[in-house]
């Protein structure tokens, strides 16, 4: 039975053979000498691009081929701009350029809807302030206070929120994310919209709609996205620029607030069942 050392040696030999084959292919190309030397250096350090793309894929997902392509472009730029007179290794410089190329790709070209970077940065700063406020004071700031903290107008902050909220693209023909995975037939979002239009008025939903209006807009938006739209916690946290643990705490606190409001209607024998049903249905 082969040992771990033997497997590592076999993999290293296979990589060396692949590198030698690609180097021979480059030598057969009719290229200027400077380009040939650059390509040979790129091939020699191509493992750095694979390492950078794999690391970025674990951090944020995406198509691995696209990330590898961008990391390779960063490696080529690093080889072109490397200055050996500074006494540094090319691997240190190349890794930073490969990571930077992937990050620029994610910022500018990966998303289907391109959001201006100033709005994305503004939204990220606002979410950091909200997270600090939640950790320090146990509550989130309203839009007016947050806009003052960011030194922008409330309209500008609302634009940043809307841009971050609308960036994820969902297929209307795809299955709804909050369906039971054991269902034999997946219900599309279009089917669910049609079903909602045919439903009869529900007093519980009427109460829930009024109760939700008393919740701060940020918490209400997160609550509806997670419980009603069925967006995964990590996906929602990434689109809002907050940590998943913070988002989870806010959702639990908001849901507890709704349940408390539902219990407060128990003075009426008819209102209590409606309120509790609506709060537990979120």
Image (cartoon, rainbow, N blue to C red):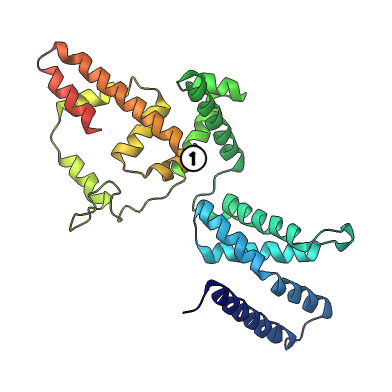
- Mark 1 falls on what kind of element? helix
Point 51% across, 28% down: residue: 131
**Residue visible at 68% across and 83% down in the picture:** 20
Please state the horizontal and vertical placement of residue 273, each as a whole percent of the image. Answer: 13, 22
Q: Is residue 125 left or right of residue 91?
A: left
Q: Is residue 57 above or below residue 114?
A: below
Could you say where residue 243 lies in the image, as x and y percent from the top left?
A: 48, 37
Indicate the position of residue 160 as horizontal and vertical percent values. Answer: 53, 35
Q: How many numbered circles does the render carry?
A: 1
Q: Left or right: 64 with respect to 259? A: right
Kindly identify the residue that appears in the image at 52 percent across and 21 percent down. 136
Q: Is residue 45 above or below residue 207?
A: below
- Which is nearer the eye, 272 or 49? 49
Residue 229's place in the image compared with 12, above or below, is above
**Res 7 seen here:** yes
Q: Nearer the viewer, residue 273 or 118?
A: 273
Q: Residue at x 34, y 38 (%)?
A: 226
């Amino acid at each position: 039975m082969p040992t771990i050392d033997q497997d590592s040696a076999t993999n290293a030999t296979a990589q060396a053979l692949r590198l030698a084959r690609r180097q021979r292919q480059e030598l057969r190309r009719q290229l200027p000498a400077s380009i040939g030397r650059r390509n040979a250096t790129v091939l020699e350090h191509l493992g750095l691009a694979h390492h950078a793309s794999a690391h970025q894929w674990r951090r944020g997902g995406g198509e691995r081929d696209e990330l590898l392509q961008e990391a390779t472009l960063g490696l080529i730029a690093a080889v072109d701009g490397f200055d050996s007179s500074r006494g540094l290794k090319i691997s240190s410089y190349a890794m930073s350029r490969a990571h930077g190329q992937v990050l620029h790709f994610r910022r500018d070209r990966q998303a289907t809807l391109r959001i201006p970077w100033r709005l994305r940065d503004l939204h990220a700063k606002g979410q950091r302030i909200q997270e600090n406020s939640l950790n320090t004071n146990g509550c989130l700031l309203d839009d007016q206070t947050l806009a003052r903290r960011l030194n922008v107008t409330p309209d500008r902050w609302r634009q940043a929120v809307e841009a971050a909220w609308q960036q994820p693209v969902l297929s209307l023909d795809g299955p709804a994310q909050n369906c039971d995975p054991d269902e034999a037939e997946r219900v599309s979002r279009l089917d669910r919209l049609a079903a909602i239009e045919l439903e009869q008025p529900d007093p519980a939903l009427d109460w829930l709609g009024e109760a939700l209006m008393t919740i701060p807009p940020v918490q209400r938006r997160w609550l509806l996205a997670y419980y009603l739209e069925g967006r995964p916690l990590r996906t929602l946290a990434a689109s809002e620029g907050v940590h998943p643990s913070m988002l989870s705490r806010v959702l639990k606190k908001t849901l507890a607030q709704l349940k408390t409001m539902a219990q407060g209607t128990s003075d009426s024998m008819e209102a209590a069942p409606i309120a509790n049903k609506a709060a537990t249905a979120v």
